[in-house]
């Protein structure tokens, strides 16, 4: 397996410009799988708190950068959906949230909100002793004695105690956000859940104030009402500008290529 990661092939969720350099840092093994963004990219390319990997390592050695309440020392540690990123020396706190186009963005939050994180239940099973083990979207597991939790529900989990402090059921009327697909970053309420026979994905219709959209069940996550109060800070993430720059650069490359082909055709005619 390669130890290098080209910018052109990074997942769409990564908030990086793809044509400024050839390579970028590769995510280490950890939460969120391939969708996780290396912490170095957040520190260097998004927030601008470090100019180099060496500076990022020094900052992390101070134990002042926390993810979900725990100090992080690995600059390649993946950061993903709904993680809580805290900079204790700066007194700054962010929640990772889906942005437009599927890119991860950072939403500023207060210190109290940074004490817990949201997780989508992706698996539920019984374990010896009669308790229930829940697996969240980021790989975290919780052992609980409450049978009311179900897959596709969302839980608010305290970062210190790992206790469930709030439960949001996946049902008609629930407030959800799309975290993937064409409607990533959009928020609305579940109007209908259409169960598809067989192995195909269930379809969810989400109503919004100015319309509606449909997506598959795996792409929606039930969220807290408070999540909609804080809009993503565009100056921090700058993801839309990066996407527009990539698109404009791609169009310019296509125009240059077409012009080069035209020149080549003209030169060929003169030679003949």
Image: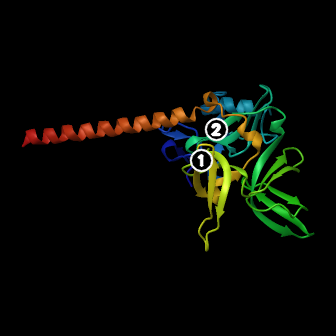
Tell me the residue at 63%/46% (across/down).
Answer: 208
Question: Disc 2 on helix, strand or loop?
Answer: strand
Left or right of 131 in this view: 192: left
Marks 2 and 1, Cα distance to the nearest angstrom? 12 Å
Q: Residue furthest front?
A: 210
Q: Nearer the viewer, residue 118 or 21?
A: 118
Q: Which colour scheme appears in the figure?
A: rainbow
Residue 95, position as x, y percentages in the image: 72, 38
Q: Is residue 30 visible?
A: no
Q: Nearer the viewer, residue 226 or 116?
A: 226
* Depicted 188 relative to depicted 57: above or below: below
Left or right of 121 in this view: 202: left
Pointer 2 residue: 105
Q: Residue furthest top?
A: 90
Q: Earlier in the sequence, mark 2 or mark 1?
A: 2
Between disc 2 and disc 1, the foreground one is: 1
Total tally of numbered discs in the picture:
2
Residue 199, position as x, y percentages in the image: 61, 71
Q: Is residue 15 visible?
A: yes
Question: Disc 1 on helix, strand or loop?
Answer: loop
Tell me the residue at 67%/34% (across/down).
Answer: 231
Left or right of 90 in this view: 39: left
Residue neighbourhood size for the residue with mark 2, other residues' Cα within 10 Å, grouped as few (<14), some (14–19), many (≥20): many
Residue neighbourhood size for the residue with mark 1, other residues' Cα within 10 Å, grouped as few (<14), some (14–19), many (≥20): many
Residue 130, position as x, y percentages in the image: 91, 69
Q: Nearer the viewer, residue 54 or 65?
A: 65
Q: Which mark is residue 184?
A: 1
| Circles 2 and 1: CB atoms closer than 8 Å | no
Tell me the residue at 84%/69% (across/down).
Answer: 126
Quarter of the figure with the N terminus: bottom right
Q: Quadrant of residue 50?
A: top right
Q: Nearer the viewer, residue 77 or 160?
A: 160
């Amino acid at each position: 397996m390669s130890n290098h990661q080209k910018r052109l092939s990074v997942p769409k969720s990564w908030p990086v410009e793809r044509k400024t350099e050839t390579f970028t840092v590769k995510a280490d093994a950890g939460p969120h799988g391939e969708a996780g963004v290396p912490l170095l990219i957040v520190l260097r390319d998004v927030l601008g708190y470090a100019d180099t990997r060496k500076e990022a390592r020094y900052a992390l050695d101070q134990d002042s950068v926390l993810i979900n309440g725990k100090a992080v020392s690995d600059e390649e540690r993946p950061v993903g959906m709904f993680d809580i990123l805290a900079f204790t020396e700066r007194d700054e706190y962010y929640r990772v949230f889906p942005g437009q186009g599927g890119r991860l963005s950072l939403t500023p939050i207060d210190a109290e909100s940074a004490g817990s994180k949201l997780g989508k239940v992706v698996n539920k099973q019984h374990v010896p002793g009669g308790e229930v083990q829940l697996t969240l979207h980021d790989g975290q597991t919780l052992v609980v004695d409450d049978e009311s939790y179900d897959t596709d529900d969302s839980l608010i989990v305290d970062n210190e105690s790992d206790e469930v402090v709030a439960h949001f059921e996946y049902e008609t009327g629930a407030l959800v956000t799309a975290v993937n697909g064409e409607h990533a970053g959009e928020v609305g309420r579940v109007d209908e859940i259409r169960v598809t026979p067989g192995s195909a994905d269930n379809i969810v219709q989400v109503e919004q104030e100015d319309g509606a959209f449909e997506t598959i069940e795996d792409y929606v996550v039930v969220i807290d009402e408070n999540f909609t109060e804080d809009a993503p800070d565009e100056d921090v993430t700058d993801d839309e500008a990066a996407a527009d720059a990539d698109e404009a650069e791609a169009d310019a490359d296509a125009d240059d290529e077409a012009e080069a082909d035209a020149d080549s055709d003209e030169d060929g005619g003169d030679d003949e």
